[in-house]
Amino acid sequence: MLAYQPRTGRLGTAAFSERYGAQLAEAAGPVRIPITADVALFSEAVDLGRDLLWWHTSGERFAPTPGARLPAGSAKEVAPVTAMPESLKDCRYDPDAEQLTVATGIFALVSPAVWDFEVSGLRVLRSWLGYRMKNRKGRKCSELDNIRPHRWTQSAELLLVLSILEHTVEVTPRAADLLDRIVNGPLIPAADLPKPTEAQRKPPKP
């Protein structure tokens, strides 16, 4: 996983896409990632990558210490969700009050940056909520998809998602600064790296 950790330190936030958005939109083929030849910068990327992996796996991997748990975020459930939301129409966000309403429930201290957070155009929080409505979004694969909950039980999970997005937003400036220093420092040329075989290029089987 050592190679994946520094890559996450550069790609795990919006810093990479904001810097190379135009090139990514036009490029065909694999994404090219700058690899620093500076040992200190490489170690810093590893540290940031481990932190993001810890958060993005909901605390299941790369904990900083054995048994460590993700810290709680700023968001709080100030009014309980007592009715099952039918659809996303039952979810509203007030950027001035920084409040997310889910049916009868209210979640406070949700920043606009968290609400607007997206990955490749996907609004993460809206998508997460959409799949948990009584009339869920997305394609149905079988009749089993029509079996939906009749009451809301997702508040704890929603608070976890909000905390993960909040942390990702918070470390994005740090990731952008790190990427800038990597790009402007000594890099390892692609020619110096071993060329993967065709078998290694194939995605792993599920």
Image (spheres, grey):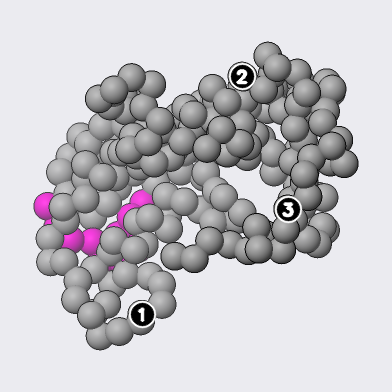
Name the residue rendered at 28%, 64% in the picture. 133
Q: Magenta segment range?
A: 82-92
Name the residue rendered at 75%, 32% in the picture. 35
Q: Quadrant of residue 61?
A: top left
Q: Which mark is residue 196?
A: 3
Name the residue rendered at 41%, 72% in the picture. 138
Q: Position of residue 21 (x, y in %)?
A: 75, 47
Circles 2 and 3: CB atoms closer than 8 Å? no
Q: Which mark is residue 154?
A: none
Q: Nearer the viewer, residue 189 or 175?
A: 189
Q: Nearer the viewer, residue 97 or 30?
A: 30
- Name above or below for residue 14 compared with residue 132: above
Left or right of 99: which side holds 148? left
Residue 3 seen by the camera: yes
**Rounded to the nearest whole Å, what is the CA distance between mark 2 and mark 3?**
26 Å
Name the residue rendered at 39%, 41% in the picture. 57
The residue wearing badge 2 is 44
Quick check: is 40 in the magenta stretch? Answer: no
